[in-house]
Amino acid sequence: MRNLFSRATSSMETSSMETSSMEMVTVEKKSRKKNIRESAERMQLSKKVKRVELRKKQNSDNLTHPPEFIVRPRGQTVWEGKTVKLHCTVAGWPKPRVAWYKNNVLIDAKTHPDKYTVESNYNMHSLEIKNLSLFVCFLSLEKHPNSVFSPSDGFCEEHGVTFHADIIESFEVAFGREGETLSLGCTVIVYPTIKRYQPDVVWYRDGVALSESKWVHSHWSGDKATLTLVHLNKEDEGLYTLRVNTKSGFQTHSAYVFVRDEEVELEGVPVAPLDVLCHDANKDYVVVTWKQPAVEGESPILGYLIDRCEVGQHHWAQCNETPVKYARFPVTGLIEGKTYTFRVRAINRAGVSRPSRASDPVTAIDPHDRARHRVGVVPGEPTDLVVTEATKSYVVLAWTPPTQRGHEGVMYIVEKCIAGTDCWQRANTGIPVKSPRFALFDLAEGNTYSFRVRCFNSAGVSESSAPTAPITVGDMLDLPAAPGPAVATRNTDTSVVVSWGASKDVKHLVGYYIDHSVVGSNVWTPCNNKPVKETRFVCHGLTTGDLCVFRVKAVNAAGYSATSVESEAVVVKAAIAVSDVPIGVHLVEAARDYMVVGWKEPIVTGGADIRGYFVDYRTVKAGFIGQWRELNHKALTTTSYKFQVRAVNMVGIKQDLSFLEHFPDPIIPPPGVPRCLHVLEVRNTSVVLLWEPPTFDGRSPVNGYYVDLKEAAPGEDWKGANNKATKLKYMKVNGLIAGRSYVFRVRAQNLAGVGEPSTVLGPVLALTMPGTHEIVLDVDDDGVISMIFECSKMAEGSKFVWSKNYKAMTDTSRLTIVTEGSRSRAIFNEPSLEDLGIFSCEVTNTDGVSASYNLTEAVIPFKTEMAMDLLEKGRVRFWTQVEKFTSDCKVEYVFNDVIVENGKVSTQPYIKNTGIIEMFMDSLMVTDEGTFTFNLIDGKAKGSTSLVLIGEGKEIIPDPNPNSNTRYQKLCSVRPWCWKDAGMYEVKLKDDRGKDISLFNLTDAGTETLLSWFYCIQLIYYGSTAPLLWFHCVLELLSSSNDSSDRVNEPTEKDKGKYTINISDGKDGVKRVCDLSGQGRICAHTHTHTHIKVFLLASYRARVVGGLPDVVTIQEGKSLNLTGNVWGDPTPEVSWLKNDKELVSDERYALKFENGKFASITIASVTPTDSGKYALLVKNKYGTEAGEFTVSV
């Protein structure tokens, strides 16, 4: 058993070994195949890994890692006053924010742009530090441990907000003249508002920060930034920039300021030079430079004169006897330690210009004054002798002082030698040189010289320096070459952009001057008074429509270049540009089969009409946003578009729309918003509002509009201007309050209801501007009817545009428009009922100058409505005065609708030179109660005026025709007056609006007040049989001292005397003599059957008797003084009103009343706010009167 088991075991082991051997062979065979397969898989996996890596790089979110410095900034040591730039390279994702710190304090480059400049490009970061001072010479920068590295979004960690700054009401291109004061200002809004936080406001001129000085003053009031330039000079011309720095960023606004030359005292002289600067100041020497002016005068500039003045004194001393043409001059002979200012004047054949603005003060000291060495040591020789400047007039030498010069200092001896000889001559024989600079004059032009320098002190004279190379006397600096041809392109209505090629091979270029000329005038005017270095300049201040050419000239210290080739003529007109994008894109309606999208026209059309629109769309499904696709291949001319959906399959597109078995009732949406709101005819109490119908009417016609308005003040609610919808597209809104601002909106209505309100229009100030005229209806001598409109504010290109019912008139056969200057006349060709309506006229290129006239019927204008006068012997006169009439005018006299024939009444033909029409009646009876009417027919025009006479005790019945020209007159008695009629009279007026009561005092006390309106002599003639007569006659002075008759306004002692009155009734007459003794009531002598009493009643009522004009037009900044003559007894009380508000005497208004007769008002330095309606109000117990006048600034 054991052996069997042994053999079996052995057999199993052998079998196992064989199996293992077979398995190993199989494995080896599989490994070779698999090796090839795995190799291919590895290659495929490698490619996949590379694709994954590339995808990861494209998706940077999977590669986030902290920031690190790849290249750190290095510490540097630099000289004081120099500029250093530090660099570093960083890596990290998200992109880190690099913050620069100095002494653990964050550097804010936005706040100090003139000191620091930070740049970041492709992970390369740099910090530039300008004008290094001692405390920043050694600077080490590294990553700050508290820095937050995140993408910069302007978030301020200190306050926890992101500041936003907006600049509104910004200043525009400004023009000033030398000597004037100019202010620039902007309103700045910074939000959110943080207590005790104010932004940093910095002003720049040509990129250089401005600081406070006697010429520049800046002010920040919390929301208003103002820069004031005192006593403008050409140095002040340039591009001004306001920069508002916050913790989150900055905002800027720029505009150019032009400074024109002051008027020259002598015609033809040049204007003043500019930019006088001092360089290389030393103990007794300084170099003065300047820039040439833009205008040389009638002849070229021959040279310049330099003046100096010690600070603290007012005496200017001329530095050079001979004018120098080079714009650079070394001034010698200064006193060490003194401080000087310099100025420059230009000279030509016509004379000397005004001096330039004085330079900044400069002190004559040695900038390199170092500690002295030993005393009594002979100094060493100077070194590094060079010629720094060489012109036709002078040569400037500079050298380095010797190292060994002793404690007492040294002075220098300058020697010159003509080239080719060995004869050295001393150049400074009269003046010792203390500075290592010296200017040599009186050198022969064209000769060649060499120079050398020695130094000396009390110990002796040094050896001479090495001589300079031979120098030929002449200008080292050539005139600049002419600039390239000028190219002018349109910019705005008052500016043109000029560009040109830079001058080639020019040294020390100062800049360019640009001139322009109107074609055909041959007069060249400078566009800039300060040279510009760029080759592109915007010329402002041009006149719209002028055809101009431009040229450019370069300038450097040597002088002016030749002018460039003139540009092609260009018209000053706004350039055409691409329009802005449409605004207000919105969904108007969305139905099951289409959508309607609307938008508004761009605010800025680029100077050309919008020809159409292109609509793009894209699909949005499950958060996936598709690409934009063009919907219409042809430009649309409307501002709405419909989207319609149809189904499509492989067969084609279904032409019919989808159909529902139960089709719901159609839904009519409300209309869209009205558009193009604007106002015309702005007056104190009304405006005319116009609008256009909405683009989308809601598939139901618009049947009306509602107008809403409110005051432009916080907390005001909207209120409707009309309770019933109007079908018109305009409305005159009344009931406004003068001087207040309003906003308006309009809503459209259809069958579905009222739609959304339009865009709010306004604010609109309800104020009638001074000089506003209305349309006047006129009838000429031939009976031709016309409307006249005048405009006192015509601008360049202004036109009169007439319309009817606020629509453009297409039928020109009805009217003929004749325009002459500032007046336009619309003449009716064939007047008929078709011409009735509202005619309006608008003047283009103005601030909304417009007016309208509601023509209901062609009427004759009356200057005075119908009135009645009581004459002697009880006769009555009815009269009126026509303003416009012809010789063919016919009159009908009507009483109670019945034409009156000659008999009871007598008529007079109207007086042609005055237009007065009269009708006389011998007396009035009770039966004469009723309406008297004058009907006028003058060619194609008609007119009528009426007067209603109603007897005693009867009420006045209102005229049922409110449009008729009817006046009422209450007669308490139609018989002649006498003294027994004295008493208190009461008049009552009543209509549907209410009632009023007026009292008339006809007693002894009231007579004096009643008759105080006149200076007159009243004669009462009565007797036993004679009828009662009334005479009112003006008192005439018969004294020989007066050449003509006059009204006795203020009786004096010289007016006493005897006056004679002849009274005649056509048959008999009587002569009476009046002795005026000044007692107030004088009785004449008594006749047999006649008594005459003469009353002399002085005018006691307060009134303004003269001195005030109707209209005063005055320039801004001037002083206004007006004096009115006042009369009254007792002396009246005087007050002044402005726009119906009483004025108080203060620093602005000086009000005086002198001698009881002269009232004056003085306004110092008037402004546009002083414009308005003024009145001088006088008042005493007998009455009140106001003298009104209008002031326009």
Image (cartoon, grey):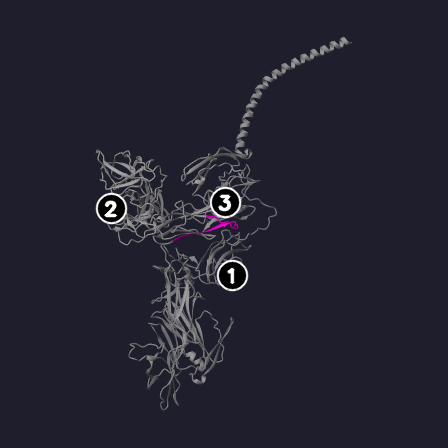
What is the secondary structure assignment of the residue under circle 3?
Answer: loop
* Residue nearest the observer in this picture, 635 or 842: 842
Circle 3/circle 2 CB separation < 8 Å: no
Query: Which one is closest to the eye, mark 1 or mark 3?
Result: 3
What is the secondary structure assignment of the residue under circle 2?
Answer: loop
Q: Measure the alpha-carbon separation of dots 1 and 2.
A: 84 Å
Q: Which residues are magenta?
A: 182-200
Q: Residues within 10 Å of mark 3 (few under 14, many from 20)?
A: some
Q: Quadrant of the C terminus?
A: bottom left
Q: Measure the alpha-carbon separation of dots 1 and 3.
A: 49 Å
Is residue 569 highlighted in magenta? no
- Judging by the rendered image, the residue that carries numbered circle 2 is 322
Given the current orientation, which residue lies at the most extreme front position? 376
Res. 722 mark:
1
Residue 1050 left/right relative to 467: right
The image quadrant of residue 853 is bottom left
What is the secondary structure assignment of the residue under circle 1?
Answer: loop
Residue 897 seen anywhere in this rendered image of the structure: no
The relative height of residue 1009 versus residue 158 in the rendered view (above or below) is: below
The relative height of residue 630 versus residue 1065 in the rendered view (above or below) is: above
- Mark 2 or mark 1, which is nearer the start of the sequence? 2
Circle 1/circle 3 CB separation < 8 Å: no
User: Where residue 1162 appears, x then y in whole percent?
Assistant: 39, 65
* Residue nearest the observer in this picture, 550 or 206: 206
- Mark 3 or mark 1, which is nearer the start of the sequence? 3
Q: Amino acid at mark 2?
A: Thr
The image quadrant of residue 470 is top left
Q: Measure the alpha-carbon separation of dots 3 and 2.
A: 58 Å
- Judging by the rendered image, the residue that carries numbered circle 3 is 248
* Residue nearest the observer in this picture, 1018 or 433: 433
Circle 1/circle 2 CB separation < 8 Å: no
* Residue nearest the observer in this picture, 955 or 204: 204
